[in-house]
Image (cartoon, helix red, strand yellow):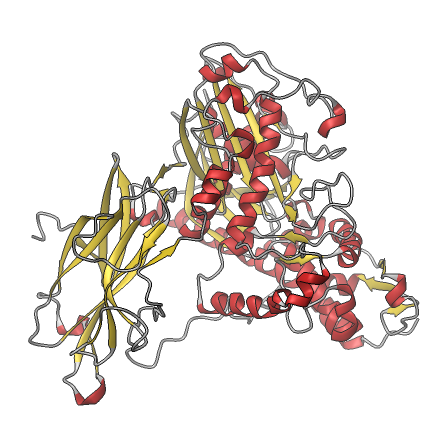
């Protein structure tokens, strides 16, 4: 079989030497400054003449129907299951049950991952210090005949053919499976992300054609649901498995146990993504309706969880392989399917219990193993099959391929074999990797890479596919090491002794050898613990167990109502009620428009630094009044038909916060001047960031302008 890819192989061989080569895509390019002042424009509101609209994200109907297995108000009823569910016929091997007594606590840890999801359950002894690592029950009872520490984070809306469950690892052959949805929770955090989402919608327009819906007899494979609601549907399945497992215990005793739930997330994860995850988990059934003695739901960064478990595991289970002593410093690299987090920790104490301290700032990037899959698909489309033939494998991807998408049976079969090759790739020897393409479409295909439908990749091509992800991870680890070395010079922090690899991608021998080759480790040990794949969820359980000592988690609260900010906003002329022409800017404005920035059930924090940011613009001329008030309204009804503007004497709205802000003392250098239409006098614009907080059952707010908190005003600033 001939191959004309000499230049490509040379490039691939060069890629195996992870030197100074760096990615040049948008994610790694430095941001270029804008050419001069750029006016901040609030989103253009296109409105009908209606003053109300329904909130569609996790709305009331979703909330009411979300706890289907546990919709009843009592714990006992929601966990009342038939006697045959505990048999292996239902969903896997019968688990070993533990003895529980009064005075214990129940901890449930949830690690929702890009490719796999894990759950750990612990009945904490009365004496928390007596808890052993073996007390942590990692749920393995998932789909029928699938018994692993984690279950695939995959879901399908395709109608099942037989007894398929259409989630996890149980799908019909024709299922269109939604995969890697977690990555979409953190989308739209930049202009490029917003463009990506728009292109997704355009790609999916064919699914809205009536003839397509008719051809599927009303059951199209696509879903109109947003990623948050797809995750909610998936989490309902996870909750159902937890419900079945806990249903085997004495229900009256379970009712009496205090409960803590710990949810993990990547170290760099937007409020929007945290909130979407929190809402999905709680609406699925992990809430006080199901667990009346629920004390708190905590959110914890994945590396924090992994570090505390891995360090303790090494100390107790593998002391001869890697010894962590007091003052030792180690880097933890959590390489998963979507995100890769790299954090450094120092061992503060080893006795009587292990205590860790984070050193420096964590580093994170979306460069997990699913991006290798995306690179393989792009190569298959662009270099091997061509866009038209590639459509036979994966429709609607002639122009763009994303790692987070849906996948059908044909591509699923191809990717299953590729992932097996990917996981076993070591990069140390010349080896050929073969994948059989669907015979019906490609049985007669012959080219440089395919012979009668058999696709062949060599080691050089595999290195090429791995290159970007591996190079990014190496860069992350190097950044961590350099940062720690600076602190070593300044603060006496010990030099790094160990690099711990965890996560599914962390098991890759090629990734490990690449880090070792590029880092010139010498006295640094590179180690992967035996339980690395489930280290995050096990560590989250430890945080729930030892919650009085391990305090790096964030306690969460739930906003009980809808909250909006009222402001005049730019609109299309004649397309709304209560409009006027702004005398400062000359633009058409809508008066007292409500932007609903908090929904009932949203994730609430006490610290404004962790809360959602809402940007507000204020315009004024040189001699105008420079004092303004930000008005926050609460919706008083229990439905989700929300007003779009604040009207006087509206019985369904309450003005709960009136936030005074002033720019009277602003220095001219801090202000940006703009020219208005129609030759009006130039004006200034100030853009502030509003953060709502929830503490002691009451709403609070912080306003930041020019990197300075201007509300609340401290005594020294008043």
User: Residue 593: image x %, image y %?
Assistant: 26, 62
Give the left or right position of residue 89, taking residue 47 as reference: right
The answer to which of 173 and 19 lies nearer the viewer is 173
260 or 63, which is in the foreground?
63
Give the answer, above or below, for where 321 lies relative to 153: above
Q: Residue furthest bottom?
A: 679
Image location (x, y in percent) of residue 205: 60, 68
Picture quadrant of residue 697: top left
Identify whether 707 is placed above or below 169. below
* 576 lies above or below 499: below
Q: Position of residue 592 (x, y in %)?
A: 22, 63
How far across and down, in percent of the image, does residue 559 sit? 33, 41
User: What residue is rendered at 47% in x and 17% in y?
Assistant: 255
| Identity of the residue drawn at 65% across and 47% down | 154
Quadrant showing the N terminus: bottom right
| Labels in figure, total | 0
Residue 122 visible? The answer is: yes
Q: Which residue is rendered at x = 17% and y = 73% of the image?
A: 669
């Amino acid at each position: 079989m001939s191959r004309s890819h000499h230049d490509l192989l040379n490039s691939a061989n060069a890629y195996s030497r992870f030197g100074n080569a760096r990615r040049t895509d948008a994610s790694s390019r430095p941001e270029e400054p804008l050419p001069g002042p750029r006016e901040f424009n609030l989103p253009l509101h296109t409105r009908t003449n209606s003053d109300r609209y329904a909130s569609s994200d996790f709305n009331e109907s979703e909330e009411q129907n979300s706890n289907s297995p546990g919709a009843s108000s009592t714990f006992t009823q929601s966990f009342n299951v038939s006697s045959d569910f505990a048999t292996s016929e239902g969903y896997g091997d019968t688990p070993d049950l533990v003895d529980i007594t009064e005075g214990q606590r129940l901890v449930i840890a949830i690690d929702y991952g890009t490719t796999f999801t894990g759950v750990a359950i612990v009945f904490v002894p009365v004496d928390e210090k007596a808890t052993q690592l073996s007390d942590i029950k990692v749920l393995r009872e998932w789909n029928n005949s699938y018994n692993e520490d984690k279950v695939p984070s995959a879901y399908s809306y395709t109608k099942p053919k037989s007894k398929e469950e259409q989630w996890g690892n149980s799908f019909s052959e024709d299922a269109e499976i939604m995969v890697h949805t977690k990555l979409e929770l953190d989308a739209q955090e930049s202009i490029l992300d917003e463009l990506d989402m728009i292109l997704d919608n355009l790609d999916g327009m064919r699914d809205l054609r009536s003839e397509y819906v008719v051809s599927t007899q009303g059951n199209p494979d696509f879903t109109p649901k947003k990623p948050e609601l797809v995750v909610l549907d998936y989490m309902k399945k996870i909750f159902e498995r937890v419900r079945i497992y806990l249903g085997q215990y004495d229900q009256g005793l379970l009712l009496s146990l205090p409960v803590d739930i710990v949810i993990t997330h990547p170290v760099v994860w937007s409020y929007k993504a945290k909130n979407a995850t929190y809402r999905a988990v709680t609406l699925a059934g992990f809430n006080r309706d199901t667990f009346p003695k629920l004390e708190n739901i905590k959110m914890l960064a994945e590396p924090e969880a992994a570090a505390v478990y891995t360090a303790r595991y090494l100390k107790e289970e593998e002391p001869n392989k890697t010894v962590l002593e007091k003052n030792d410093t180690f880097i933890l690299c959590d390489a998963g399917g979507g995100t890769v987090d790299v954090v450094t920790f120092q061992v503060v104490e080893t006795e009587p219990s292990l205590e860790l301290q984070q050193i420096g700032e964590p580093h994170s990037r979306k460069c997990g193993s699913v991006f290798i899959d995306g690179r393989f698909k792009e190569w298959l489309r662009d270099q091997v099959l061509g866009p038209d033939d590639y459509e036979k494998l994966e429709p609607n991807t002639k122009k763009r391929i994303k790692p987070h998408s849906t996948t059908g049976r044909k591509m699923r079969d191809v990717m299953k074999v590729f992932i097996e090759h990917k996981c076993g790739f070591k990069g140390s020897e010349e080896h050929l990797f073969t994948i059989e393409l669907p015979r019906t479409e490609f049985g007669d295909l012959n080219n440089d890479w395919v012979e009668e439908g058999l696709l062949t990749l060599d080691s050089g091509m595999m290195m090429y596919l791995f290159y970007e992800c591996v190079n990014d991870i190496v860069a992350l680890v190097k950044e961590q090491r350099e940062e720690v070395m600076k602190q070593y010079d300044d603060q006496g922090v010990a030099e790094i002794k160990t690099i711990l690899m965890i996560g599914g991608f962390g098991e890759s021998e090629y990734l490990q050898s690449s880090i070792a080759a590029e880092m010139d480790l010498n006295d640094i040990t590179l180690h992967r613990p035996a339980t690395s794949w489930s280290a995050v969820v096990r560590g989250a359980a430890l945080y729930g167990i030892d919650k009085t000592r391990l305090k790096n988690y964030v306690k969460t609260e739930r906003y009980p109502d809808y909250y909006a900010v009222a402001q005049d906003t730019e609109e299309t002329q004649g397309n709304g009620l209560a409009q006027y022409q702004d005398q400062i800017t000359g633009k058409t404005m809508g008066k007292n428009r409500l932007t609903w920035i908090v929904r009932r059930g949203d994730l609430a924090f006490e610290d404004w630094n962790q809360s959602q940011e809402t940007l507000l613009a204020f315009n004024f001329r040189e001699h105008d009044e420079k004092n303004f008030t930000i008005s926050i309204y609460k919706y008083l009804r229990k439905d989700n038909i929300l007003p779009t503007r604040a009207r006087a004497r509206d019985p369904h709205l309450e003005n709960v916060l009136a936030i005074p802000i002033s720019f009277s003392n602003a220095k001219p250098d801090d202000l940006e001047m703009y020219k208005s239409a129609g030759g009006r006098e130039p004006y200034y614009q100030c853009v502030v960031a509003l953060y709502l907080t929830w503490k002691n059952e009451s709403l609070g707010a912080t306003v930041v302008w020019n990197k300075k908190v201007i509300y609340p005003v401290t005594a020294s600033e008043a």
